[in-house]
Image (cartoon, rainbow, N blue to C red):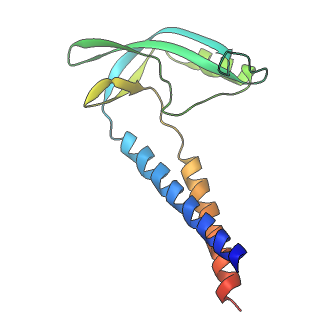
Amino acid sequence: MIVLLFVILLGAGLVAIGLWLGVHGLRLRSWPTAPGRILEKQVTRDGPSGDDPYFFVAKLRYRYTVDGRELEGERIYRGHFHSFEPEMRAFVEALPAELPVHYRRSDPQDAFLFFDSLQWAALALACGAALMFIGLAARYGG
């Protein structure tokens, strides 16, 4: 009985996290954009001191203009994005020199280039719903 309650609560927690991630991700899509220009781009090792032996991150610096103010940014995604070196180098090399920068209307220095995928929201929702269904079916299904 305790295990079933735990499974149901875990599922509900995952559903809540999935909903929050989805709403937050969709809200970001309403941010305005400004034309941006990449100033620097490189690929470095991931990790707090750049010592991760497997994963690499893109480091960018870009300039964009909002209401006549020139600003600079470095954030690529709202979250963290890393990959193996060949994939990350291909990602960086494929970036155009000019691209739109998404910025927060109330604080234009809060900016990023690309939206995070909503896949984590969908995964959390699906797993949470499945756990809740399994727990409820085991409890009340007979």
Reply above or below: 94 against 139. Answer: above
Residue at 57%, 31% (x, y): give it: 80
Residue at 20%, 19% (x, y): give it: 67
Of all residues shown, which one is farthest toward the bottom? 142
In which quadrant will I find the C terminus? bottom right
Among the 4 quarters of the image, the one containing residue 66: top left
Among the 4 quarters of the image, the one containing residue 52: top right
Residue at 67%, 82% (x, y): give it: 137
Decide if residue 142 is on the left or right side of residue 126: right
Reply above or below: 26 against 77. Answer: below
Please tell me which residue lies in front, 91 or 119: 119
Decide if residue 26 is on the left or right side of residue 4: left
Residue at 65%, 20% (x, y): give it: 48
Of all residues shown, which one is farthest toward the left? 67
Of all residues shown, which one is farthest toward the top? 39
Decide if residue 58 is on the left or right side of residue 115: right
Reply above or below: 101 against 42. Answer: below
Residue 109 lies, in percent from the top left, at 33, 21
Residue 5 lies, in percent from the top left, at 64, 75
Residue 113 lies, in percent from the top left, at 45, 26
In which quadrant will I find the N terminus? bottom right
Determine if residue 116 is in view.
yes
Determine if residue 101 is in view.
no
Looking at the rendered structure, the number of numbered marks drawn on it comes to 0
Of all residues shown, which one is farthest toward the front? 2
Residue 3 lies, in percent from the top left, at 72, 73
Please tell me which residue lies in front, 107 or 30: 107
Among the 4 quarters of the image, the one containing residue 59: top right
Reply above or below: 142 against 57. Answer: below
